[in-house]
Image (cartoon, grey):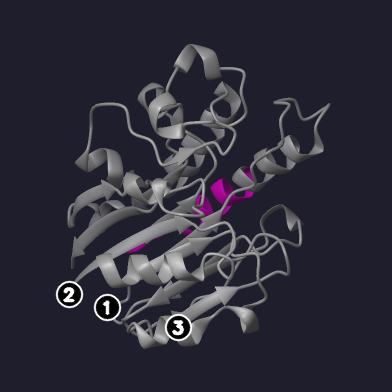
């Protein structure tokens, strides 16, 4: 079974329904994982997506905030969702493909602006969220699984425009990178994107605050595709669709792709 998967923080699936449809029509990934849908499940524009061949969906929704969805041309079985750190947020959903592979779609909290849990409750929630993910994967030892999503951390020095400038900026601080590394180690996850593109600056997010995001190019790689070791060798064709950041009315994130032959 061969399939292509994409992950995209869409920053409102209803507001950017047309952009999702454009990606589906132009790129046609077999599975599309969306984060920050900002919609109850029943208000996700599924008819538009079904008309483009995405006849299956597993989702967790929330009015105005968060929300994750897995849209697929392939049959999906709902494999549950976790409320990490008991935040009451729709930030995780899992689905099982016909070949038994489980896809985890995650939206890790951004963590606010101050990288200190004593001064910033949101930063503490982010670390707690990651700690519970680590503990779950350590206990369950996932197999034949793929984890994707906006993990809101750029772990490597070449995942940000300036390692030195961002060391004290939320998303690239050492404590966040350490926590994300612990999640990876607990599940023995392989970073598929960096497996395929091991060297060089690589970004999936550019701030709305930049007057000219493309020229400034102060990006971060916040969006990830991981796989367990038993299937990571079957992954290939990773790419980041940078041009989407220049579409009219864009998300500040762009889709990340990988293909699998299983």
Residue 2 highlighted magenta (yes or no): no
Distance (Cα) linking label 2 and label 1: 7 Å
Residue range (magenta): 131-145
The residue at 33%/33% (across/down) is: 202
Sort mark 3 into few (<14), some (14-19) or many (20+) by Cα contacts within 10 Å: some
Q: Position of residue 154 (x, y in %)?
A: 47, 33
Q: Position of residue 125 (x, y in %)?
A: 73, 43
Residue 1 is labelled as 2
Sort mark 2 into few (<14), some (14-19) or many (20+) by Cα contacts within 10 Å: few
Magenta-colored segment: predominant secondary structure: helix
Distance (Cα) linking label 3 and label 2: 26 Å
> Is 85 on the left-hand or right-hand side of 22?
right
**Residue 213 seen in the current view:** yes
Q: Position of residue 208 (x, y in %)?
A: 57, 39
The residue at 35%/65% (across/down) is: 23
Q: Which residue is mark 3?
A: 48
Provide the secondary structure element on which disc 1 rests.
Answer: loop
Provide the secondary structure element on which disc 2 rests.
Answer: loop
């Amino acid at each position: 079974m061969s399939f292509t998967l994409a992950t995209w923080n869409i920053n409102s699936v209803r507001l950017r329904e047309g952009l999702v449809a454009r990606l589906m029509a132009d790129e046609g990934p077999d599975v599309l994982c969306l984060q920050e849908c900002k919609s109850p499940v029943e208000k996700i524009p599924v008819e538009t997506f079904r008309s483009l061949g995405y006849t299956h969906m597993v989702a967790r929704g929330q009015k105005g905030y968060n929300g994750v969805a897995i849209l697929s041309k392939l049959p999906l079985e709902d494999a549950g969702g976790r409320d990490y750190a008991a935040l009451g947020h729709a930030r995780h959903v899992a689905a099982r493909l016909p070949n038994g592979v489980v896809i985890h779609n995650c939206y890790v909290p951004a963590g606010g602006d101050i990288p200190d849990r004593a001064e910033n409750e949101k930063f503490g929630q982010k670390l707690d969220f990651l700690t519970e993910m680590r503990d779950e994967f350590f206990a369950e030892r996932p197999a034949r699984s793929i984890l994707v999503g906006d993990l809101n951390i750029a772990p490597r020095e070449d995942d940000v425009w300036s390692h030195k400038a961002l060391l004290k900026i939320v998303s690239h601080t050492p404590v966040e990178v350490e926590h994300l590394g612990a999640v990876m180690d607990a599940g023995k996850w392989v970073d598929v994107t960096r497996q395929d593109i091991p060297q060089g600056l690589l970004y999936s997010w550019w701030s709305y605050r930049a007057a000219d995001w493309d020229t400034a190019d102060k990006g971060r790689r916040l969006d990830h595709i991981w796989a367990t070791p038993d299937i990571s060798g079957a992954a290939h064709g990773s790419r980041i669709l940078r041009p989407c950041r220049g579409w009219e009315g864009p998300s500040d994130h762009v889709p990340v792709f990988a293909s699998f032959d299983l």
